[in-house]
Structure formats: C-alpha cells, structure tokens
Amino acid sequence: MRQFLDFEKPVAELENKIDELRQMTDPDGVNIAEETARLSDKAEKHLRAIYAKLTPWQKVQVARHAQRPHTQDYVNALLTEFTPLAGDRLYADDKAIIGGMGRFDGQPVVVIGTERGSDLETRLAHNFGMARPEGYRKAQRLMKLAGRFNLPILTFIDTAGAWPGIDAEQRGQAEAIARSIEVCLEAPVPLIATVIGEGGSGGAVALGAGDRVMMLENAIYSVISPEACASILWRDPKQASTAAETLRLTAQDLSRLGLIDRIIPEPVGGAQRDPKAAIASVHDALAEELQALMPLAPARLKELRREKFLAMGRENLS
C-alpha cells in the first residue's frame, strides 16, 4: 500500500476515489473508465504542482520516505554476478553497510552502501542504516581491495548518520570515519558516490569523498539533521522546518554551492512512486560518469579529487 506524506493529502484523496471506483460492481450508469481517467489526470496535475515547489523540509520528508528504493534495491537492479563480502577482519560484520563485487553493465566494480532496511525486522538487522566503526572499516577494506584489483568503486549513501552509541565510541567511531574518508581520497580507481535518500553527517561523508558526488533530485545531504540543528540553535525540535531552510541541504542548494557534481532526476512524486524509473536514472548517470573516469590514470584521479575538495574550502560559500 502506498504511503502518503502530509502535503500529499489532495493526491491521496483523489487516488482513494480512483481505487473505490475500480472496485465498484454496480456503476449506476457511471462510466468508470472515463471517470478514473479524469481523476487520474487531476491527481497527476496535483502531484506535479506539489513537487514543483517542495520546501526543504518537505524534501527531507521525501528523502526519508520508507518506500524509496534502498541500497539493496539498487544492487539487485544494477549489478549482475554480485558477491557480497562481509566483515572488517578486526571485530565484526556491520550490516548497516553492505558491500561486495559485481558487474555493472559488464564492468567489474566494487559496491558499498548504507542499508536502512525496508520493514521493522530488516531495519533492526541493519540498525536503521547507522554504522558502527566495524562498518566503516569494512568499507575501507573493500575500497583497498578495489584499488588492488583496479576496480571502480560505486557507493550509495542513505543514512541519518553514524551510530552514536557508547559501544561505537569505545571502538573508535571518529577514527574509523576519518580513516574511511582518507581511503576514499587515496583510492587509485574511480569512485562515484550517490546520495539516494538521506546523507547525514560524517556517516555519509565516510563514503562520499569521491571523484563524482551525485544526488537524487529529492535527496538531502547535511552535516546535521534539521531536528538536531533546531534543538541546538533554538532549543526546540519543532523548528526543524526553519533549520532545513537554513542548512541548504537540498540537491539544488548543494549544486549551486559546488558541493556536488550532478543531480539525478526522479519520477514525478519522488523515487518512491516509481522505483524502477528512479533506478534507471541512476544507472544512466553512473554509466556516463564511469565512461568519463575510467580512462584516467590513478595519479591523475587522485590529483583531480584532491583539487576538487580543496576548492570547496577556497570558495566563498556564504
């Protein structure tokens, strides 16, 4: 069953009427096909109008939508011969980060991504996509493996942030994230990072320091969540919508600031309404970017990557 966000209520009402019409057994002279077509057209127009002017806070809600495709969905759809790899060879296997080797359009690649889970059972198993240090150390191991065998790296980011528990701090969460960023920057192979939902804090940056950083149209990427920001600045989490405006966390804001390289369009109504179309758009963007990066020598890749991120600090981001 499709889940609707609060601001989608006009569309929800129309689509509920369409469902009711389709279930009618005695139409009483009503032309069901004609009426459902009229209501469908009206619903689509409403949806287009709503999504043409989403506020940053509304985009936060879309990015977090439970029915958006997750990393595992992209892996299943985009890769063939995928072999998952587990463990950091130091402590444990963190299921918040999944990864492995497969073929993307026939090209062998290493894929790493944060996985939130799609229902209560899988969300608990994947810790809602919030990784512990062993997850980031697993990511480092896979990136180094990719460098050793000259395989491009594709990362998919969808996390509220790294796990903030005491156990994570005891095992060196900050060091693990910092080291993961370092390994990204030093990778001798192309690295393309795609924010498919929520990119939160260092937990997202740990997989995001790539040659190309892409975001889906309704994804968000920020150093802090709007709720946490509002709690700190205004002592009131209800100010989250104001914080979302201030943080400039949308793909459009970050593109204007030069912090990401590409915005990937989503179907009308967001990736959750048509996951196959959203995944197809990501496929096309990845294929194009890989084609541009594959001919570059390792030294040139690292040089350009270094310049890319140093330039962000030189520019006036006010």
Image: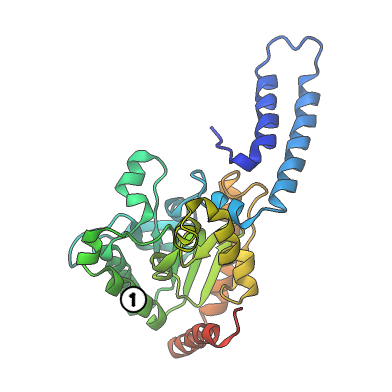
Quarter of the C terminus within the rendering: bottom right
Q: Residue furthest front?
A: 235
The image position of residue 301, as x and y in percent, is 48, 85
What colouring method underlies this structural image? rainbow
Quadrant of the rendered image containing residue 137: bottom left
Q: Answer left or right for 161 relative to 145.
A: right
Is 148 situated above or below 58?
below
The image position of residue 148, as x and y in percent, is 32, 79
Is 219 situated above or below 32?
below
Q: Residue at x 42, y 43 (%)?
A: 118
Q: Which residue is mark 1?
A: 178
Q: Nearer the viewer, residue 317 or 155?
A: 317
Q: Nearer the viewer, residue 282 or 15?
A: 15
- Residue 139 is at least partly visible in this image: yes
Q: Residue at x 38, y 76 (%)?
A: 181
- Residue 88 is at least partly visible in this image: no
Q: Nearer the viewer, residue 259 or 153?
A: 259
The image position of residue 61, as x and y in percent, is 55, 49
Look at label 1 and name its amino acid: Ala
